[in-house]
Image (cartoon, helix red, strand yellow):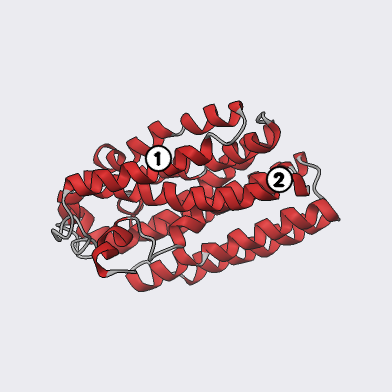
Amino acid sequence: MPRRIHPFIRLSRFDRPIGTWLLLFPCWWAIAMASIGPAHWHLFVLFGLGALLMRGGGCTWNDILDRDFDAQVARTRDRPLPAGEVTVRQAMIWFAMQLAISAAILFSFNSFAIWTGLASLSLVALYPLAKRVTFWPQFVLGLAFNWGVLLGWAAVTADVNWPAFVLYAGGIFWTLGYDTIYAHQDRTDDTAAGVKSSARALGLLASKPWLVAFYLIAVALFGIAGFGAGLGWVFWVGLAAGTVQLVWQVVDVDLDSPKDCLAKFKSNRLFGWLLLAGIVGGHLS
């Protein structure tokens, strides 16, 4: 891409797609769980583009609000806003552009799905502020990042049934796990900057037991959702394989190593694929 737009690519994290995957998988899980028929295949594409843009818009909004904090943290001080590569006005225009295209995608859905999508905007707006007032901004992120479960289900059925809410709750606990690992990268700098996180709240000693709890609850809820949706035996194979992946994360992660924390965080893309494969296969078995 032309060098003049590199700062905007970085502002939206288009060069770091793992966040898009983590936002997208709950959407795809819900679409696949609600129905795997060809009539809804186009939704996989639309939600893929929507996840890219909404994650980009969310990161842009986050960086606008957090530019002073980011300047105090080693990992984030070279982001475009604290580094002076873009102005706040330019970032706001870029944010509005991404939001406008996302809105065009949303308004192509049924009316129930449109209202469901609009209901998520308050969570997107509030998440960057959560780290100022609570040591559990990861929970707020889970509420926002997994809203795609409810939206995806609504886009397929024009309704939200109880397995969707259980799948949504499972996604929240999944996010609590992987984002606590991610937050350990900045544990020391966050303390100095006054930024709150679950990594700071739990510390090194308590984090792994809590990660076990988060992931076990997530797996149990995913299983209940799959059972409620009437999925066959292949679903349980996919969920079991995903559980092994989550166990490996907790056992192997070095919470004192930012590099390893990032690697384990990124490995959740594999979990997303395993669960999606299980859901799709569960319809066919």
Identify residue for label 2: 40
Depicted 220 relative to depicted 15: above or below: above
The answer to whether residue 144 is left or right of residue 92 is right
Taking depth in this image into account, of 226 and 82 the one nearest to the observer is 82
Marking on residue 64 = none
Report helix, strand or loop for mark 1. helix
Position of the N terminus by quadrant: bottom left
Residue 45: give x, y in percent of width and height.
Answer: 60, 53
Residue 88: give x, y in percent of width and height: 18, 47
Left or right, residue 257 beside residue 30: left
Image quadrant in which you'd find residue 204? bottom left
Q: Kindly report the distance in space between the C-alpha atoms of the residues bearing marks 1 and 2.
A: 24 Å
| Residue at image point 63% right, 42% down | 167
Asked whether residue 10 is in view, the answer is yes
Badge 1: residue crowd in 10 Å (few <14, some 14–19, many ≥20): some
| Placement of 89 over or under 258, stated as above or below | above
Quadrant of the image containing the C terminus: bottom right
Return the x and y of residue 15 as percentages of the image width and height: 38, 66
Q: Residue at x 18, y 44 (%)?
A: 89
Specify the amino acid type for callout 1.
Answer: Ala
* Chain-order first, disc 1 or disc 2: 2
Instruction: Say what amino acid the circle numbered 2 marks.
Output: His
Instruction: Give the residue pinned by disc 1.
Output: 100
Find numbered disc 2 in the image and state the secondary structure of the residue it sits on: helix
